Image (cartoon, grey):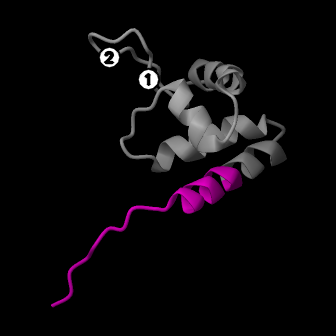
Amino acid sequence: MRRNTVREPSRAEMARYAGKFGDVFASAGLPRLSGQVVGYLLVCDPELRTAGQIAEALGVQRSDVDAPLRLLVAVQLVQRSIPPHSPTPVY
C-alpha cells in the first residue's frame, strides 16, 4: 500500500507560483506585486508572515510590499492581524 506524502514546495517553485499569480493580476490591470503577494501567501508555511518575510521571499525591498499589502487588506483578499505580545503585524 502506497502512502500519500506531501512534499514541501521548493523556494524556486514558490517563486514561480507567486510569479504566475502576479501575471494573472497584471493581465487584469492590477499591480503584479499584489498578485505575487497573494500567490506566495497561498503556499508559504507557516501561513502567517510579516511584511519583511514576504518581501524577502519575493526578492524585493520591505517598503515595496507596503502598498500591495494595504490594497489586498482593503479589498479583503488578505487579513492583517497583530499576534499577542508582538508589535509586528502578520498577514
Q: Say which residue appears at 69% left-offset and 52% top-offset.
A: 19
Residue under label 2, please give it: 83
Q: Nearer the viewer, residue 9 or 74?
A: 9
Above or below residue 17? Residue 58 is: above
Q: Residue furthest bottom?
A: 1
Does 45 sit above or below residue 85? below
Disc 2 and disc 1 in contact, CB within 8 angstroms:
yes
- Which part of the image, by quadrant, shows the N terminus? bottom left
58 magenta-colored: no
Q: Is residue 62 above or below residue 41?
A: above
The residue beneath circle 1 is 90
* Residue in the picture at 76% in, 51% down: 23
Foreground pick, 15 / 28: 15
Label 2: which secondary element: loop
Q: Confirm whether the magenta stretch covers residue 6.
A: yes
Q: Identify the mark nearer the N-term, 2 or 1.
A: 2
Question: What is the count of numbered marks?
Answer: 2
> In this rendering, would 43 be left or right of 67?
left
Residue 58 in the image, given as x and y percentages of width and height:
63, 42
Magenta stretch?
1-20
Q: Position of residue 79 (x, y in %)?
A: 47, 24
Question: Where residue 6 appears, x then y in whole percent?
Answer: 32, 68
User: How far apart are the two marked residues, 2 and 1, measured between alpha carbons?
Assistant: 7 Å
Percent position (x, y) of residue 80? 47, 20
Query: Alpha-carbon neighbours of circle 1 within 10 Å: few (<14), some, or many (≥20)?
Result: some
Mark 1, secondary structure of its residue: loop
Looking at the rendered structure, the kind of residue marked 1 is Val
Residue shown at the point (78%, 34%) measured from the top left: 31
